[in-house]
Amino acid sequence: QHGGQARLVITSRRDMPLERLKLPVFRLEPLTDQQIAEFLGRHFRDAQQEAEAFIRNLRLWEWCRNPLQLWMLVQVGLRARAGLPENRGQLLRLFVEHLLKREESRGPQTPRDIKLDLLSEIGYQTRREARVSFSRLQAWQIVKQRSQEMGYQIDSANFIREVCDNHLLEDQGEQLAFAHEMYQEYFAACGLKRRYEANPGVVEPLQSQTHWREPLVLLWGLLDPESRKALFELLVRDE
């Protein structure tokens, strides 16, 4: 149909075995100290002061080597003066809150607690199936089922349209996907958190599944300190 001229770009995490596809592979390397400083310099008058705020916490400085995480830190940790997050789970929580507040300032939205709950269910259900993209029908069904369980008065089609407008989901025609896999991982972690608090054993079969690695890390960050300790001990015990 396209005369052999169609071009595709496949993006993935580093641990995906793309070599077997026999295609050219380009790796996006972590940002250098100089690149981080230049980014901060474009966004702040006193870039040196802002950089020092990150450097004092070496873990945060290492997060800055990921371009998306650097941008998130700038948005929620410095511009909003919300305080620097302790871990990636808290970073994603603050960033999603920042996005939702921005959307709420533009017009009527689904109540935030309901929106977060429904997105968490979509994230959890699609991650459980190891799917990055999923059908529009499946998303509608997940929203409908969760709304019935919780007594929400939500129209599934309108809700999906709204979160696409919020740039949390991406409309790909008949298929949908979270705008970034990190969003899916975060909402999957939120959905898992609800289940973990009801039954801690729910995480045991997940730790051996590669696609749950990051959601488990984010889950740990979303828990209170005592629950973090319990989760760590549970996962180490089963190693």
Image (spheres, grey):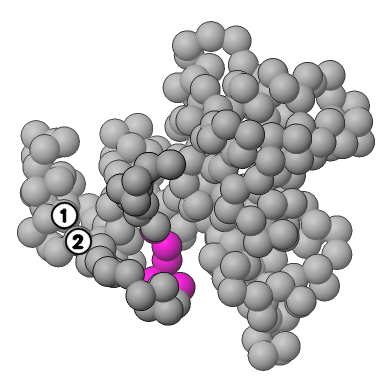
Q: Seen in the image, is 68 located left or right of residue 17? A: left
Q: Position of residue 143 (x, y in %)?
A: 78, 33
Q: Position of residue 102 (x, y in %)?
A: 45, 22
- For disc 1, the marked residue is 36
In front of the other: 141 or 223: 141
Q: Gap between marks 1 and 2, in whole Å?
A: 6 Å
Note whether 151 is above or below 188 in the view shown: above
Give the amino acid at mark 2: Leu
Q: Position of residue 3 (x, y in %)?
A: 34, 46
Residue 149, located in which quarter of the rendered image? Answer: top right
Bin the neighbour count of mark 2 within 10 Å (Cα to Cα): few under 14, some 14-19, many 20 and up: some
Disc 2, SS: loop
Q: Main secondary structure of the magenta part?
A: loop
Q: Earlier in the sequence, mark 1 or mark 2?
A: 2
* Label 1 close to label 2 by CB (< 8 Å): yes
Give the residue at x 85% y 64%. Answer: 199
- For disc 2, the marked residue is 31
Is residue 111 at all visible to an observer of this figure? Answer: no
Give the amino acid at mark 1: Ile
Magenta stretch in the rendered image: 11-16
Note whether 103 is above or below 168 in the view shown: above
